[in-house]
Image (cartoon, rainbow, N blue to C red):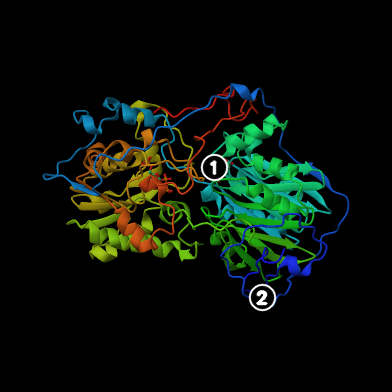
């Protein structure tokens, strides 16, 4: 087994292969990786003990459902992504004229526009992803997990859950809604123990039902395992079909469940090699934390699409989280990222062991984390999100200048880029839109006749800032175009003389298959229209996007995934997006049963 395990250069990490004679490693040739394997000096960090005894499984609230005949699941194919008609990034009207809510302006009147009409009845934003957390060696593990999930709430609002381990028993509480909806003092009291994992969910595979809320817990031959996953598996359907052919029965319609089945059927010993064995069969994005009776394991896929960081509390407790903002909240010091393709095992016997067991591929972290998803106070992929957004705003001001009196942001995610834009343009930044923090993200507009009600409820214009002004409005992205069109109208109604939209990312032309629930390509406005047509649609006097080349240059070239802007997918999306595979039984929460048919993209 020489050369298989690669301890990192930090002396805190050690190679299991060289020091643990009890391991029975039956796989002779695990792939070599490019991680630093230089440090011969190894030491252990041992968090407080867990008590070994017989394993049991205790799941608190999840009621399992059953799946019917897989042959009824339709195979789907997706059209190749189209190039947008015009690849230019900047567009303005020669003669800016107000395009307010006048019904005479067809380009801006949603009732005349089938594209917009469809959007009005749907949630019209890029969906968040998911957030994961894992804590080992703290007597307050589940409470810390709960706090960390609050810090990660922006990554998923459909459901939340925590699994803790106490006396070799796994305890689980999961529920739909926000972290504050799911957990109470009494629920947290049901989660004793010094290790725990947690999850906030925005679904990418499997609908928004209680049964799909993570972490999942399963019993297998030698014990129990819980998993929390951020990402999306592009070969999920194929794996599930194969497993079902072999007799596996699935409890959920989430892609994540295949991981547990693959672990259960693996013949590898010890446990972490089962995880490695399972992960080798996965394609796509996964930043995952696993919990067992005596271990916490963190894994990141070989491309490192999704973030995952490691930190440590003063008492030595080891913490993993999707973003550093979660570490900050629970006073864990950021140590480093979990590297792409790395498996980190934390247990009482060995402390922290870092293994490079998955094939090493070109890193492709998601650039959209820096543009939209992560909080600005986080360090993601080793870079400050705040700095990225600020610099992107500055670049945008250089690339797409316009005469203006004031720069405002679409809160929240446009704020930092707007600050950068204003600083570079030498124009005051002002709060021209006030956001209500009491409106949930799942707000549904009541009817088309009062179609701006939703955006007005969330964003209120400040007339004092806008009246008679030439206004630059900075937002992070345009997905379907509905937010921008409504905002332009609001700002014009508040008396702005001109409205110039500046978007701190390139046009989005492709769906994400790696954990972001973006709409299908036919719903992405920049996939259907060139910049001038998008400008007409949103009704602004000018519109400019950040050029993709400028973004790449700033982020450092091809070391990121830009698939949503370029259509170049580092891992080919083999299966189409499947939100409802296996949803044959309603758990009474989603209010709909789709009889198991997958939802085909309309193009
Ligand atoms: O083109 P659309 O389909 O309308 O989607 C784009 C909008 O959605 C996001 O905002 P979100 O409402 O998620 O708020 P946030 O900025 O607070 O994250 C994003 O910041 C854009 O404003
Ligand atoms: N957004 C995500 O990371 C989702 C994780 C997983 N694919 C799910 O749908 O639950």
Residue 37's place in the image compared with 481, above or below, is below
The x, y position of residue 289, in whole percent, is 65, 53
Q: 10 Å neighbourhood of mark 2: few (<14), some, or many (≥20)? A: some
The quadrant holding residue 126 is top left
Q: Is residue 510 left or right of residue 252?
A: left
Which type of secondary structure does the marked residue at label 2 adopt?
A: loop
Specify the quarter for ligand 2: top right
Residue 524, position in %: x, y?
A: 36, 38
Read off the residue under disc 2.
11
Report the side of 499 relative to 291 (left or right).
Answer: left
Coordinates of residue 35 in the picture (x, y in percent):
58, 66
At 40% from the left and 32% from the top, the residue drawn is: 79
Nearest to the eye among marks 1 and 2: give it.
2
Tell me which residue sits at (26%, 65%) in the image.
424
Q: Residue furthest front?
A: 28
Q: CA distance from mark 1 to mark 2?
A: 37 Å
* Mark 1: secondary structure: loop
- Mark 1 vs ligand 2: CB under 8 Å? yes
Position of the C terminus, as image quadrant, is top left
Task: Left or right? Give the position of 292 relative to 8.
Answer: right
Q: Nearer the viewer, residue 379 or 143?
A: 379
In which quadrant of the rendered image does the N terminus lie?
bottom right
Q: Which residue is mark 1?
A: 202
Q: Are discs 1 and 2 less than 8 Å apart at CB?
A: no
Residue farthest to the right, as pictured:
53
Judging depth in this view, the residue of 45 and 49 nearest the camera is: 45
């Amino acid at each position: 087994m020489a050369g298989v395990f690669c301890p990192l250069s930090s002396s805190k990490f050690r190679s299991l292969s060289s020091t643990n004679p009890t391991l029975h490693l039956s796989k002779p040739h695990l792939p070599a990786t490019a991680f630093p394997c230089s440090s011969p000096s190894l030491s252990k960090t041992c968090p407080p003990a867990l008590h070994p005894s017989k394993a049991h499984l205790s799941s608190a609230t999840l009621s399992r459902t059953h799946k019917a005949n897989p042959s009824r699941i339709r195979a789907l194919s997706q059209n190749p992504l189209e190039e947008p008609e015009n690849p230019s990034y900047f567009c303005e009207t020669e003669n800016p004229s107000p395009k307010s809510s006048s019904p005479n302006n067809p380009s801006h009147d949603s009732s005349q526009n089938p594209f917009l009409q469809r959007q009005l009845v749907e949630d019209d934003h890029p969906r968040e992803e998911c957030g994961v957390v894992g804590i080992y060696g703290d007597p307050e593990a589940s409470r810390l997990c709960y706090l960390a999930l609050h810090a990660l709430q922006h990554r998923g609002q459909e459901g939340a859950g925590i699994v803790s381990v106490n006396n070799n028993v796994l305890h689980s509480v999961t529920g739909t809604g926000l972290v504050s909806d799911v957990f109470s003092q009494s629920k947290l009291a049901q989660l004793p123990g010094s290790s725990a994992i947690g999850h906030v969910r925005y679904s990418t595979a499997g609908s928004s039902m209680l049964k799909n809320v993570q972490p999942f817990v399963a019993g297998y031959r030698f014990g129990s395992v819980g998993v929390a996953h951020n990402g999306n598996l592009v070969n999920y359907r194929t794996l599930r079909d194969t497993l079902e052919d072999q007799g596996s029965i699935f409890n959920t319609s989430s892609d994540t469940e295949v991981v547990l089945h693959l672990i259960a059927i693996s013949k590898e010993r010890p446990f972490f090699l089962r995880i490695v064995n399972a992960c080798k069969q996965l394609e796509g994005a996964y930043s995952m934390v696993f919990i067992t009776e005596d271990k916490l394991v963190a894994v990141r896929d070989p491309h490192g699409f999704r973030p995952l960081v490691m930190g440590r509390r003063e008492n030595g407790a080891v913490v993993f989280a999707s973003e550093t903002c979660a570490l900050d909240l629970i006073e864990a010091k950021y140590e480093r990222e979990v590297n792409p393709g790395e498996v980190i095992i934390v247990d009482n016997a060995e402390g922290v062991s870092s293994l490079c067991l998955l094939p090493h591929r070109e890193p492709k972290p998601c650039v959209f984390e820096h543009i939209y998803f992560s909080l600005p106070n986080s360090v993601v992929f080793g870079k400050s999100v705040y700095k990225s957004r600020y610099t992107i705003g500055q670049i945008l001001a250089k690339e797409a200048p316009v005469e203006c009196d004031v720069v405002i942001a679409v809160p929240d995610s446009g704020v930092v880029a707007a600050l950068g834009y204003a600083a570079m343009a030498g124009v005051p930044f002002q709060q021209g839109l006030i956001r209500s923090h009491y409106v949930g993200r799942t707000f549904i507009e009541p009817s088309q006749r009062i179609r701006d009600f939703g955006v007005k409820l969330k964003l209120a214009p400040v007339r004092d800032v806008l009246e008679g002004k030439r206004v630059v409005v900075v937002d992070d992205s345009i997905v379907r175009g509905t937010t921008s069109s409504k905002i332009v109208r609001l700002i014009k109604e508040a008396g702005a003389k001109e409205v110039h939209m500046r978007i701190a990312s390139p046009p989005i032309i492709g769906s994400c298959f790696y954990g972001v629930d973006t709409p299908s390509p036919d719903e992405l406005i920049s996939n259907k229209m060139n910049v001038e047509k998008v400008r007409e649609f949103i009704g602004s006097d000018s519109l400019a996007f950040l050029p993709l080349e400028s973004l790449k240059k700033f982020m450092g070239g091809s070391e990121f995934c830009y698939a949503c802007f370029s259509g170049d997918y580092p891992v080919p999306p083999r299966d189409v997006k499947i939100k409802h595979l296996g949803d044959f039984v309603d758990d009474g929460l989603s209010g709909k049963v789709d009889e198991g048919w997958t939802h085909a993209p309309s193009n």
